[in-house]
Image (cartoon, rainbow, N blue to C red):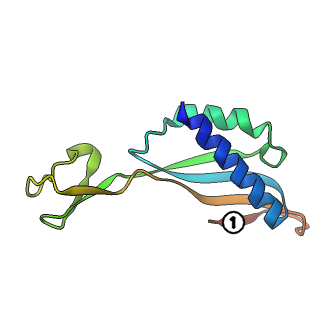
């Protein structure tokens, strides 16, 4: 289950960010997860719930997942298409000279957090 490894890396990254930015509490983390990234969102959420309890800054945080559609580019006809629906063969020209543009990523999009410097409320950190 590679979800556990990704969550461990994410938690470490957020701990480092919290230290750098003087963050005392993270309220939510929004991730963009590619449609063909291989990440199983249910397992990812379970791993998040397990690991957030081991990181004080994440203890009360919410994980928000947004799916990024998989889009493939065809070098032969220079058009894009839905990867999941059509696979590696271009539906426009039948070429196999294609490559994935988006849909394989896992990116921190936004973090809602409280810092030491704040009196009240939350700051939104967009990564």
Q: Is residue 109 left or right of residue 48?
A: left
Instruction: From the top left corner, tell me how far across and down residue 17 is, in percent.
Output: 75, 60
Q: Residue placed at 56% from the left, 36% from the top? A: 3
Q: Is residue 125 left or right of residue 86?
A: right
Q: Is residue 103 visible?
A: yes
User: In the rendered image, which residue does mark 1 sit on?
Assistant: 125
Q: Residue placed at 11% from the left, 57% from the top? A: 92
Viewer-side residue, 74 vs 60: 74
Quarter the C terminus occupies: bottom right
Q: Residue placed at 90% from the left, 64% from the top? A: 116
Instruction: From the top left corner, tell me how far across and down residue 21 is, in percent.
Output: 80, 66
Q: Is residue 106 left or right of residue 80?
A: right
Mark 1 lies on a secondary structure that is strand
Viewer-side residue, 17 vs 42: 17
Viewer-side residue, 74 vs 123: 74
Q: Is residue 43 above or below residue 13?
A: above
Instruction: From the top left corner, tell me how far across and down residue 1 is, in percent.
Output: 54, 30
Q: Is residue 51 above or below residue 102?
A: above
Q: Is residue 68 above or below residue 85?
A: below
Q: Is residue 44 visible?
A: no
Instruction: From the top left corner, tell me how far across and down residue 122 is, in percent.
Output: 78, 62
Name of the residue lying farthest toward the left:
93
Quick one: label 1, few (<14), some, or many (20+) residues within 10 Å? few
Quarter location, residue 125: bottom right
Q: Residue placed at 39% from the left, 52% from the top? A: 103
């Amino acid at each position: 289950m590679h979800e556990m490894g990704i969550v461990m890396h994410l938690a470490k990254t957020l701990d480092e960010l919290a230290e750098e930015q003087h963050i005392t509490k993270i309220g939510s983390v929004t991730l963009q997860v590619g449609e063909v990234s291989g990440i199983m969102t249910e397992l990812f959420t379970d791993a998040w719930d397990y690991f957030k309890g081991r990181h004080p800054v994440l203890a009360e945080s919410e994980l928000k997942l947004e799916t990024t559609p998989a889009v493939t580019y065809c070098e032969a006809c220079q058009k894009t298409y839905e990867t999941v629906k059509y696979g590696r063969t271009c539906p426009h020209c039948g070429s196999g000279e294609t490559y994935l543009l988006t849909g394989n990523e896992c990116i921190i999009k936004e973090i809602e957090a409280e810092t030491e410097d704040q009196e009240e409320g939350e700051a939104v950190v967009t990564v």
